[in-house]
Image (spheres, rainbow, N blue to C red):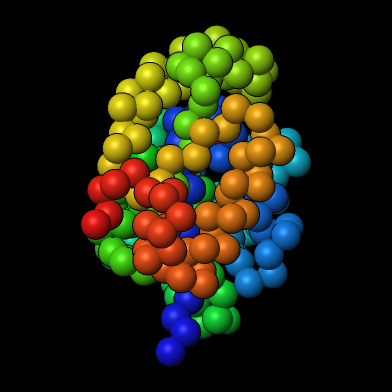
Amino acid sequence: MYSPKLIIFTAPSGAGKTTIVKHLLKVRNDLAFSISACTRTQRYGEVNGMDYYFLSVSEFKKRVADGDFVEWEEVYENQFYGTLKPEVERLLNLGKNVIFDIDVRGAVNIKKYYQDHALTIFVAPPSPEVLFERLNNRKTEDEESLKKRIARAREELTYERKFDVTLINNDLETALKEAEHIVETFILEGFEGIKKHEYGNGNHQ
Ligand code: 5GP
Protein backbone atom coordinates (compact mmCIF):
# COMPACT_ATOMS: atom_id res chain seq x y z
CA MET A 1 0.00 0.00 0.00
CA TYR A 2 1.19 3.51 -0.79
CA SER A 3 2.22 5.45 2.30
CA PRO A 4 3.10 9.12 2.23
CA LYS A 5 6.74 9.95 2.87
CA LEU A 6 8.63 12.59 4.80
CA ILE A 7 11.47 14.43 3.11
CA ILE A 8 13.66 16.49 5.37
CA PHE A 9 15.97 19.13 4.02
CA THR A 10 18.61 20.31 6.40
CA ALA A 11 21.82 22.31 6.01
CA PRO A 12 23.98 24.92 7.60
CA SER A 13 22.38 28.34 7.39
CA GLY A 14 23.15 29.82 3.94
CA ALA A 15 23.65 26.55 2.03
CA GLY A 16 20.54 27.17 -0.07
CA LYS A 17 18.10 24.59 1.25
CA THR A 18 15.12 26.98 1.33
CA THR A 19 15.53 27.72 -2.40
CA ILE A 20 15.62 23.99 -3.12
CA VAL A 21 12.56 23.26 -0.98
CA LYS A 22 10.58 26.07 -2.65
CA HIS A 23 11.53 24.77 -6.09
CA LEU A 24 10.38 21.24 -5.26
CA LEU A 25 7.05 22.54 -3.98
CA LYS A 26 6.58 24.33 -7.29
CA VAL A 27 7.31 21.31 -9.49
CA ARG A 28 5.57 18.57 -7.46
CA ASN A 29 1.96 18.86 -6.34
CA ASP A 30 2.19 15.68 -4.26
CA LEU A 31 4.42 17.57 -1.79
CA ALA A 32 3.28 19.84 1.03
CA PHE A 33 5.44 22.03 3.25
CA SER A 34 5.47 21.45 6.99
CA ILE A 35 5.00 24.93 8.39
CA SER A 36 7.08 25.21 11.53
CA ALA A 37 6.35 27.30 14.58
CA CYS A 38 8.96 29.87 15.54
CA THR A 39 9.47 32.82 17.85
CA ARG A 40 11.78 35.01 15.79
CA THR A 41 10.57 38.31 14.35
CA GLN A 42 8.62 38.01 11.11
CA ARG A 43 10.75 39.19 8.16
CA TYR A 44 9.52 41.48 5.43
CA GLY A 45 7.50 39.46 2.91
CA GLU A 46 6.86 36.54 5.24
CA VAL A 47 3.29 35.47 5.91
CA ASN A 48 2.09 34.07 9.22
CA GLY A 49 0.64 30.59 8.63
CA MET A 50 2.50 30.21 5.34
CA ASP A 51 6.21 30.62 6.04
CA TYR A 52 5.91 29.95 9.77
CA TYR A 53 3.39 30.05 12.57
CA PHE A 54 4.87 33.01 14.43
CA LEU A 55 4.39 32.55 18.17
CA SER A 56 5.45 34.49 21.25
CA VAL A 57 7.99 32.74 23.49
CA SER A 58 5.28 32.05 26.08
CA GLU A 59 2.88 30.59 23.47
CA PHE A 60 5.72 28.43 22.17
CA LYS A 61 6.60 27.18 25.67
CA LYS A 62 2.97 26.35 26.37
CA ARG A 63 2.84 24.17 23.26
CA VAL A 64 6.08 22.46 24.34
CA ALA A 65 4.46 21.73 27.72
CA ASP A 66 1.33 20.43 25.96
CA GLY A 67 3.49 17.93 24.02
CA ASP A 68 2.53 19.44 20.65
CA PHE A 69 5.96 19.22 19.01
CA VAL A 70 7.60 16.32 17.14
CA GLU A 71 10.84 18.21 17.78
CA TRP A 72 11.86 21.73 18.75
CA GLU A 73 15.15 23.57 19.16
CA GLU A 74 16.45 26.86 20.46
CA VAL A 75 18.18 27.43 17.12
CA TYR A 76 19.53 30.84 18.18
CA GLU A 77 19.55 32.34 21.65
CA ASN A 78 15.93 32.86 22.68
CA GLN A 79 14.71 31.97 19.18
CA PHE A 80 12.74 28.75 19.22
CA TYR A 81 11.72 26.69 16.20
CA GLY A 82 9.71 23.49 16.13
CA THR A 83 7.72 21.01 14.08
CA LEU A 84 4.11 20.70 15.23
CA LYS A 85 2.54 17.22 15.40
CA PRO A 86 -0.90 18.46 14.25
CA GLU A 87 0.72 20.18 11.25
CA VAL A 88 2.40 16.98 10.04
CA GLU A 89 -0.79 14.97 10.70
CA ARG A 90 -2.85 17.52 8.74
CA LEU A 91 -0.63 17.13 5.67
CA LEU A 92 -0.36 13.33 5.88
CA ASN A 93 -4.16 13.14 6.15
CA LEU A 94 -4.37 15.04 2.87
CA GLY A 95 -2.33 12.17 1.36
CA LYS A 96 0.65 14.46 0.73
CA ASN A 97 4.32 13.69 1.04
CA VAL A 98 5.61 16.16 3.61
CA ILE A 99 8.70 18.27 3.01
CA PHE A 100 10.59 19.96 5.86
CA ASP A 101 13.16 22.75 6.08
CA ILE A 102 14.78 22.44 9.49
CA ASP A 103 18.09 22.79 11.31
CA VAL A 104 20.54 19.89 11.68
CA ARG A 105 19.60 18.97 15.26
CA GLY A 106 15.90 18.99 14.49
CA ALA A 107 16.55 16.81 11.43
CA VAL A 108 18.39 14.23 13.53
CA ASN A 109 15.45 14.11 15.97
CA ILE A 110 12.74 13.96 13.34
CA LYS A 111 14.55 11.05 11.66
CA LYS A 112 14.52 9.18 14.99
CA TYR A 113 10.79 9.79 15.23
CA TYR A 114 9.75 8.77 11.69
CA GLN A 115 12.66 6.41 10.92
CA ASP A 116 12.35 4.73 7.51
CA HIS A 117 9.38 6.86 6.47
CA ALA A 118 11.77 9.83 6.39
CA LEU A 119 14.66 10.70 4.10
CA THR A 120 17.15 13.27 5.41
CA ILE A 121 18.98 15.34 2.79
CA PHE A 122 21.93 17.50 3.86
CA VAL A 123 22.50 20.42 1.50
CA ALA A 124 26.22 21.18 1.54
CA PRO A 125 28.00 24.25 0.20
CA PRO A 126 30.91 23.61 -2.21
CA SER A 127 33.25 24.73 0.61
CA PRO A 128 32.97 26.34 4.07
CA GLU A 129 34.46 29.59 2.66
CA VAL A 130 31.70 29.87 0.06
CA LEU A 131 29.12 29.43 2.81
CA PHE A 132 30.58 32.17 5.02
CA GLU A 133 30.72 34.51 2.04
CA ARG A 134 27.05 33.80 1.18
CA LEU A 135 26.03 34.55 4.76
CA ASN A 136 27.99 37.82 4.61
CA ASN A 137 26.18 38.85 1.44
CA ARG A 138 22.71 38.14 2.78
CA LYS A 139 22.22 41.56 4.45
CA THR A 140 19.10 40.49 6.36
CA GLU A 141 21.07 40.40 9.62
CA ASP A 142 22.81 42.95 11.81
CA GLU A 143 26.50 42.44 12.65
CA GLU A 144 25.80 40.58 15.90
CA SER A 145 23.33 38.04 14.50
CA LEU A 146 25.53 37.53 11.43
CA LYS A 147 28.42 36.53 13.72
CA LYS A 148 26.13 34.10 15.51
CA ARG A 149 24.98 32.58 12.22
CA ILE A 150 28.55 32.07 11.02
CA ALA A 151 29.60 30.41 14.28
CA ARG A 152 26.60 28.15 14.09
CA ALA A 153 27.11 27.30 10.40
CA ARG A 154 30.67 26.22 11.22
CA GLU A 155 29.35 23.69 13.72
CA GLU A 156 26.45 22.57 11.52
CA LEU A 157 28.88 21.56 8.76
CA THR A 158 30.15 18.78 11.03
CA TYR A 159 26.72 17.05 10.99
CA GLU A 160 26.83 15.90 7.38
CA ARG A 161 27.50 12.20 7.99
CA LYS A 162 24.43 11.85 10.20
CA PHE A 163 22.08 12.20 7.21
CA ASP A 164 20.97 9.81 4.47
CA VAL A 165 21.99 11.88 1.45
CA THR A 166 24.33 14.81 0.77
CA LEU A 167 23.40 17.23 -1.99
CA ILE A 168 26.17 19.66 -2.93
CA ASN A 169 24.85 23.06 -3.92
CA ASN A 170 27.56 24.41 -6.19
CA ASP A 171 25.65 25.27 -9.34
CA LEU A 172 22.01 25.95 -8.36
CA GLU A 173 20.40 24.59 -11.56
CA THR A 174 22.30 21.31 -11.18
CA ALA A 175 21.37 21.07 -7.49
CA LEU A 176 17.68 21.65 -8.27
CA LYS A 177 17.66 18.87 -10.89
CA GLU A 178 19.48 16.51 -8.55
CA ALA A 179 17.02 17.32 -5.74
CA GLU A 180 14.15 16.47 -8.12
CA HIS A 181 15.72 13.10 -8.95
CA ILE A 182 16.43 12.20 -5.33
CA VAL A 183 12.89 13.06 -4.21
CA GLU A 184 11.30 11.22 -7.14
CA THR A 185 13.42 8.15 -6.40
CA PHE A 186 12.56 8.13 -2.70
CA ILE A 187 8.84 8.59 -3.30
CA LEU A 188 8.67 5.81 -5.89
CA GLU A 189 11.27 3.36 -4.63
CA GLY A 190 12.10 4.26 -1.02
CA PHE A 191 15.56 3.48 0.34
CA GLU A 192 16.01 0.67 -2.18
CA GLY A 193 16.08 3.30 -4.91
CA ILE A 194 18.37 5.62 -2.95
CA LYS A 195 20.85 2.75 -2.65
CA LYS A 196 20.45 1.62 -6.25
CA HIS A 197 21.16 5.11 -7.62
CA GLU A 198 24.05 5.56 -5.16
CA TYR A 199 22.67 8.77 -3.71
CA GLY A 200 23.24 7.62 -0.15
CA ASN A 201 25.93 8.55 2.34
CA GLY A 202 26.28 4.88 3.13
CA ASN A 203 24.81 5.19 6.64
CA HIS A 204 21.56 3.52 5.60
CA GLN A 205 22.35 -0.11 4.81
P1 5GP B 1 15.29 31.17 9.54
O1 5GP B 1 15.22 32.03 10.77
O2 5GP B 1 16.42 31.56 8.64
O3 5GP B 1 13.97 31.04 8.84
O4 5GP B 1 15.63 29.68 10.05
C1 5GP B 1 16.70 29.44 10.87
C2 5GP B 1 16.96 27.96 10.97
O5 5GP B 1 15.89 27.31 11.68
C3 5GP B 1 17.04 27.28 9.61
O6 5GP B 1 18.12 26.36 9.63
C4 5GP B 1 15.73 26.56 9.53
O7 5GP B 1 15.82 25.42 8.69
C5 5GP B 1 15.53 26.16 10.98
N1 5GP B 1 14.15 25.72 11.26
C6 5GP B 1 13.01 26.14 10.67
N2 5GP B 1 11.96 25.47 11.15
C7 5GP B 1 12.44 24.60 12.07
C8 5GP B 1 11.82 23.59 12.90
O8 5GP B 1 10.63 23.35 12.91
N3 5GP B 1 12.65 22.89 13.72
C9 5GP B 1 13.98 23.10 13.74
N4 5GP B 1 14.69 22.34 14.58
N5 5GP B 1 14.59 24.02 12.98
C10 5GP B 1 13.83 24.76 12.15
Q: What quarter of the picture does the C terminus occupy?
A: bottom left
Instruction: Confirm whether residue 95 shows in the render.
Output: yes
Percent position (x, y) of residue 28?
68, 64
Where on the picture, by quarter, is residue 95? bottom right
Residue placed most toward the observer, 61 or 22: 22
How many numbered callouts?
Answer: 0
Q: Position of residue 112 (x, y in %)?
A: 25, 58
The correct choice, above or below, for 107 with respect to 141 in the image is below
31 with respect to 5 (left or right): right
Residue drawn at 48 percent across, 76 percent down: 4
At a point 34% along the width and 35% down the height, the residue shown is 160
Question: Quadrant location of the N terminus?
Answer: bottom left
Asked whether residue 87 appears in the rendered view, the answer is no
Dividing the picture into quarters, in which one does residue 16 lie? top right
> Which residue is rendered at x = 61% and y = 66% of the image?
31
Residue 173 in which image quadrant: top right
Residue beneath the point at 62% across and 54% down:
180
**Residue toward you, 113 or 192:** 192
Does 148 appear above or below 26?
above
Q: How far across and down, in percent of the image, does residue 82 sit?
A: 41, 51
Foreground residue, 195 or 63?
195
Across and down, in percent, residue 44 comes to 73, 36
